[in-house]
Every structure is written in C-alpha cells, then in structure tokens.
Image (cartoon, rainbow, N blue to C red):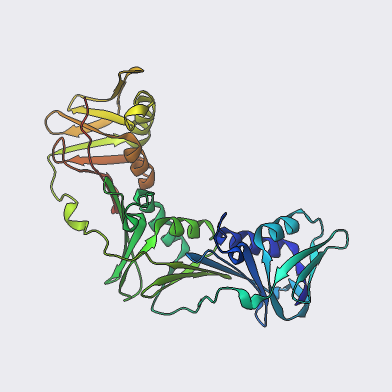
C-alpha cells in the first residue's frame, strides 16, 4: 500500500476511528487501526469488539484531490502512535508507504517515521453491511432524541439492560426510553417510515455517535437481531445490542395528578444547585416545599448546616406538599427539556412525579422521591 493524502482529512479519520480503541485490551491486535486503500478510498477502521467505527477518506471531495499516487493495499498500525505522529507532523500532505507488510513509512518532506505494522489479514472480520430493518432520519432529530433521554440510563454494570437506550419504532413514531430504576426519560419523534423494531443500544454509544455528526444531515439506522449500524456521511458505527427484555415502563408513568407546579426553569435550577451544596453527603437530597403562596427549596446536613431558597416565579395548584428528591436528577431533567418554564406534576409525597415542558409533550421525565428528614 502506498498513497499521498491530505493531512487534515487523514487526521480527522484517525481521530474518529480511534474512539473505538480501548485503552486496555487483552487482545493486542485491538490496539491497531486497519488502513485499507481500495477503489472507494482509504477506509480506516477501529474496534474493541463491542463497537466498531469505520471512516472513509475519499479520493476527492468536490474538486479537491484528497488522495493521489495510490497503490492499493492494507495494513494494521498502532492507533495511538499513528494518530500522534500524524497530528504532530507539519506538512499539509503526507506520504504513506507500507514496506514488506511490516513497516509503515510516513513522510511529509520534513519529518519521516517508520512504524511497525501487521498484515491486515490478522484483523477481526467485521460485517459493516447494512441489514435488518433500515430507518433514515435527520441527524438533528436523532441528536435531540438521545440528548433528551439517554442521560437517565444507568452507568452501573450490575444490570446491563439499564445501561441501554431502548429504541422502539412503530406506526410512524420513534420512541427512546432510558431508566436507571430511580428515574426515567422518554422522548418521541415522528418518522416518515413504517419501520418497526425494538432494540436496546448502549446509551453511551448513542451519545458518542451524536458527537461525531459535525454537520452531517442524514442518518441511516440498520437494526438487526444482534447489532445496530449508524451510517452518516463517510462514517459507519457498528455496536452490539444489549440482550434481554427492557423493563416495561409505560405503566409506571402516572396519567393523573393532584398537584401542579409551574416554575421558571432557570430559577429552580439555580435554587437547587445552591441548596444541594449542603447535601452532598446525602445523595444531593433537597426538599421542595410547595403551597399556593410559597415555594421553597431546602437542604440540611448534620455535618455542614442547612440551606433555604425561596422561589419567586411560580404557580402551584393543590394543597401544601413536601417532596424530597435527588436534586441532580431534577437538574438533569430540566436541562434536557430546554424550556423557559417547566411543569412538575405530583400524585402524592412518595409517588413518582414527572417534569414536563408545557409547550412540548414529546418529552417526559419521571423521578422517584426519596425519604428524608
């Protein structure tokens, strides 16, 4: 394999695909990126067996030549070392040549490196062809779907299914649900498709994919029985699905309420953030005390003291109510709603409550209260 390649495009591909490389792996081959120069361009692929990312550097972008002097071939090169070498070279174009399947020479006219490499045949065989149920949607739509739901997934591996974002497509609606059993977030969007599927994708993978969009317009999802492919521009991300049945969550979302609080989102966020400084050793628990003429946020710590915040902009409907909860959960929920004002709906002191955007019913955030002082 040999080629001359635009440094900027090459480095972009290395940065994207290196995100699939694990810091530590029992298999030393997984520390490498596969570089495959073929008729389409240079395919750069990285994997940790749980997630695979492939980025294509094409021969041309518009009228601009990206790859020239091409001699087809493939090789495995250490991801971290290759990326750092390319990043630190000054030239705008790099020449790369693989010699005897064992040495990769990289040269920009000023600097020259020779990196050990491995035959490409040793690389894990990964199927990146779309199959199963195919769905196309806007990247912005998918990003909002993930941003307003995935944060509620668990980060603990004790119950792997709870680390997933559950995606369900049915009758023109795509629904994303995440829960860690103490809170739940659900977001729905309309899709121009009759696709029908239900799958559990690692929530972190979904979030990481949205960070790779960088101006991409359209996303194609290919969902099979065991994996999902995300395809956008010249990037393919393949992730395993998390096996198992996702918890049935629809039944736990209350349909009727006895108390309603409408409040300025930023004022409530600021009050909870300040009050929670006095509750760090108690899982960031704050108490929301509500009446028609007064709403207060308070926190208390035997070691540190107490805090009391009064909310000025609100409307409360119902008899007096005190509810305690993990303030971080409510802060995350309000930020995800991206609303000027939020509506918090309660059934009773120790019943799960929901946080809503009064102007957008496509998102619902549910939080379980906590017992406190």
**Can residue 323 be seen?**
yes
Q: Is residue 364 left or right of residue 219?
A: left
Residue 314, position as x, y percentages in the image: 26, 31
In front here: 358 or 196? Answer: 196
Would you say 42 lies left or right of 301 here? right
Image location of residue 325, percent across then percent down: 26, 35
Question: Residue at 78% of width from left, 70% of height from top?
Answer: 103
Name the spot of residue 347 as percent of width and height, x first: 14, 41
Q: Identify the image quadrant of residue 197.
A: bottom left
Q: Residue at (25%, 28%) from the top-left corner?
A: 287
Looking at this view, name the residue that lies furthest to the right.
110
Q: Residue shown at 63%/59% (left/top)?
A: 15
Is residue 358 visible in the rendered structure shown here? no
Image quarter (top left, top right, bottom left or bottom right) of the N terminus: bottom right
Residue 124's spot in the image, x, y percent? 56, 73
Splitting the image into 4 quarters, where does residue 329 fall? top left
């Amino acid at each position: 394999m040999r080629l001359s390649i635009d440094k900027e495009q090459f480095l972009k591909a290395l940065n994207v695909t290196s995100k699939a490389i694990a810091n530590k792996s029992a298999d030393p081959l997984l520390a490498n990126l596969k570089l495959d120069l073929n008729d389409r361009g240079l395919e750069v692929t990285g994997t940790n067996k749980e997630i695979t990312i492939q980025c294509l550097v094409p021969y041309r972008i518009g009228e601009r030549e990206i790859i020239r002097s091409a001699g087809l071939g493939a090789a495995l090169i250490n991801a971290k070392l290759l990326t750092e070498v390319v990043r630190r070279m000054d030239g705008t174009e790099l020449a790369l040549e693989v010699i005897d399947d064992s040495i990769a020479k990289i040269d920009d006219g000023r600097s020259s490196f020779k990196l050990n490499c491995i035959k490409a045949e040793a690389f894990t065989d990964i199927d990146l062809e779309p199959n199963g149920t195919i769905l196309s949607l806007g990247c912005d739509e998918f990003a909002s779907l993930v941003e307003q739901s995935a944060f509620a997934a668990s980060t603990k591996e004790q119950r792997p299914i709870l680390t997933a974002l559950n995606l369900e497509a049915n009758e023109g609606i795509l629904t994303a649900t995440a829960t860690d059993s103490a809170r739940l977030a659900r977001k729905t969007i309309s899709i121009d498709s009759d696709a029908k599927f239900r799958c559990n994708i690692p929530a972190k993978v979904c979030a990481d994919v949205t960070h790779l969009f960088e101006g991409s317009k359209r996303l194609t999802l290919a969902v099979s029985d065991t994996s999902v492919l995300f395809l956008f521009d010249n990037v393919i991300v393949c992730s395993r699905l998390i096996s198992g049945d996702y918890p049935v969550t629809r039944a736990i979302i209350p349909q009727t309420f006895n108390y309603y609080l409408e409040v300025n989102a930023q004022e409530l966020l600021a009050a909870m953030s300040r009050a929670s400084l006095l509750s760090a050793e108690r899982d960031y628990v704050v108490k929301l005390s509500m009446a028609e003429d007064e709403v207060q946020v308070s926190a208390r710590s035997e070691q540190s003291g107490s805090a009391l915040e009064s909310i000025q902009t609100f409307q409360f409907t119902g008899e007096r109510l005190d509810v305690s909860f993990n303030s971080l959960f409510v802060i995350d929920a309000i930020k995800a709603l991206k609303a000027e004002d939020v509506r918090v709906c309660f059934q009773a002191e120790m019943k799960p409550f929901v946080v809503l955007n009064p102007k957008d019913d496509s998102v619902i955030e549910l939080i379980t209260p906590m017992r406190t002082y």
